Amino acid sequence: MQRISMLGSGFIGRFYADSLQGQRSRDKIVSIYSRREESAQKFAADYQVPHWTTDMEASIAHPDVDVVCISLPNNLHEAAVLLCCKHKKGVICTKPLGRNAEEAKRMLEAVEKAGIFNGYLEDLVYTPKFLKALDSVKNGALGRILWAKSRETHPGPHSEWFWDKEQAGGGCILDLGCHCVEIARSFIGKDIKPVEVMCWADTQVKPIDAEDHAIGLVKYENGAIGQFEVSWTFRGGLDLRDEVMGTEGTIWINNFLRTGLDMFTTGKGADYVAEKAESNTGWLFPVGDELNDLGYNHMFTDMFAAMEQNRAPQESFYDGYVVNAILDAAYRSAASKQWEPVKLEIWRGREHVGKDFSQQEYDAQYYLVKEEMTHYGTKKLILKDKESGAIIEKIID
Ligand SMILES: NC(=O)c1ccc[n+]([C@@H]2O[C@H](COP(=O)([O-])OP(=O)(O)OC[C@H]3O[C@@H](n4cnc5c(N)ncnc54)[C@H](O)[C@@H]3O)[C@@H](O)[C@H]2O)c1
């Protein structure tokens, strides 16, 4: 059993609480910090939390607390982490870890120096569909991974601080791109170094300083490419899709808008449908078990199992730092319109991994380029002569 201090009683604090105390969970939130007394009290009443406070340090230092869950706006993550270090409490922090890599690096170094457990709450690499897909990738079902793409787009966040560049640290690249980058990075291999980023970003619709739409490419040292597509201006709900392409296969994941549950209603009695749904009438696409389908349950299970087994979780502050470093390069690229290097002062993966490019043998003279069965009953082989390099066609009837 883990006894948790929850910092923040807003959107994600409540999703986390629903997951942490859902089903027959043994884990309990024992202290809630919120900046407003009435919010802290309401959260405490809703989730039967014995201690509530408007003093962040008092919640972290509370003697009953084993681990602190940070669910605060991005600009408050670092201060909260440093207090956890001071009181030697394990810490799990929502995404993005920092507003930039510099902040994330300071947090990573602080928790490691303090010797406390640290986990990065990137729920979208814990969804049941993602975990199954990752398993298939790791088992080699897709061969060598060439391209991993992730898209998160919705009509914009739910609280004022997200829209303020100083508090949030950026726009949709940071807010949504952090998910996409970690998804693609996990499929490509977290030990493979991300080297360069090319990114387009613009403020197309909203009256804000930050970007509300962006597309980026992340190049990895082994030749694989990651792609993120993010928007705060997308209409139609929350679009969460991933694609992975390998030499031997493909995976498409749709996490939210088409999950196989379609419903029509005239609107009578309709209320909440799913996160960021834009309508509650007509044809709707609810999500069966949002907490589970968004990965929260598997994420907390891994976090607390890791704490109890004295191991690192699947996602640690180090991963949060790498993600921030990739996104910093994306921001630099959007400004320079050039490929920008990913600056990783801390790198714990493999070095100098070359492109694994092996040609498929056909016979002593040729490599096989392609084999195709045509609609007119002829089988064609496209071959490359090993010596001359000439490409030829061979018909097999
Ligand atoms: N899927 C996810 O992993 C996911 C989803 C949404 C948000 N988040 C992250 O969770 C964090 C919080 O986002 P949210 O959506 O819950 O926001 P929110 O606005 O709904 O809630 C934020 C909480 O922090 C409190 N707060 C705001 N400003 C404060 C201040 N100056 N001092 C002290 N407390 C303050 C609010 O009162 C509220 O309790 C962010 O880092 C965000 O990126 C993660």
Image (cartoon, rainbow, N blue to C red):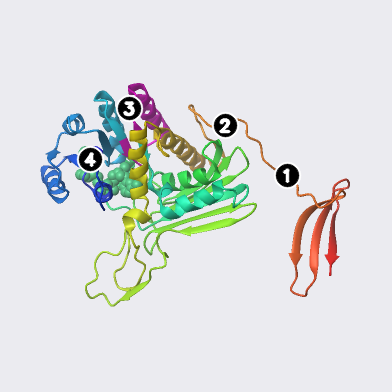
Amino acid type at circle 4 is: Met
Residue 96 image-quadrant placement? top left
The answer to which of 335 and 327 lies nearer the viewer is 327
Cα distance in 3D space between marks 1 and 3: 44 Å
The answer to whether residue 354 is seen in the rendering is: yes
Q: Are marks 2 and 1 in contact (CB under 8 Å)?
A: no
Quarter assignment of residue 5: top left
The percent coordinates of residue 357 (x first, y second) are 70, 43
Q: Residues within 10 Å of mark 2 (few under 14, many from 20)?
A: few
Disc 1 Cβ-to-ligand 1 distance below 8 Å: no
Q: Using the image as rendered, state which of residue 273 and residue 315 is in the foreground.
A: 315
Q: Earlier in the sequence, mark 2 or mark 1?
A: 2
Looking at the rendered structure, the kind of residue marked 3 is Ile
Q: Please rate how many residues cluster around mark 4, counting C-alpha atoms within 10 Å: few if below 14, some from 14 to 19, many from 20.
A: many
Disc number for residue 350: 2
> What residue sits right under mark 4 in the picture?
6
- Residue annotated with mark 3: 116
Q: Is residue 323 left or right of residue 280?
A: right
- Which residue corresponds to the image point at 47% horizontal and 47% vertical from the top-left? 183
Which type of secondary structure does the marked residue at label 4 adopt? strand
Splitting the image into 4 quarters, where does residue 288 fall? bottom left
* Structural distance between the alpha carbons of marks 3 and 2: 25 Å
Vertical placement of residue 311 versus 236, above or below: above
- Indicate the amino acid at tag 2: Arg
* Earlier-in-chain disc, 3 versus 4: 4
The range drawn in magenta is 92-118
Per the image, the residue denoted by label 1 is 358
Q: Position of residue 107 (x, y in %)?
A: 35, 29
Amino acid at circle 1:
Ser
In the displayed structure image, the side of residue 243 where residue 361 appears, left or right: right
Mark pair 3, 4: CA separation = 17 Å
Query: From the image, which quarter does the C terminus lie in?
Result: bottom right
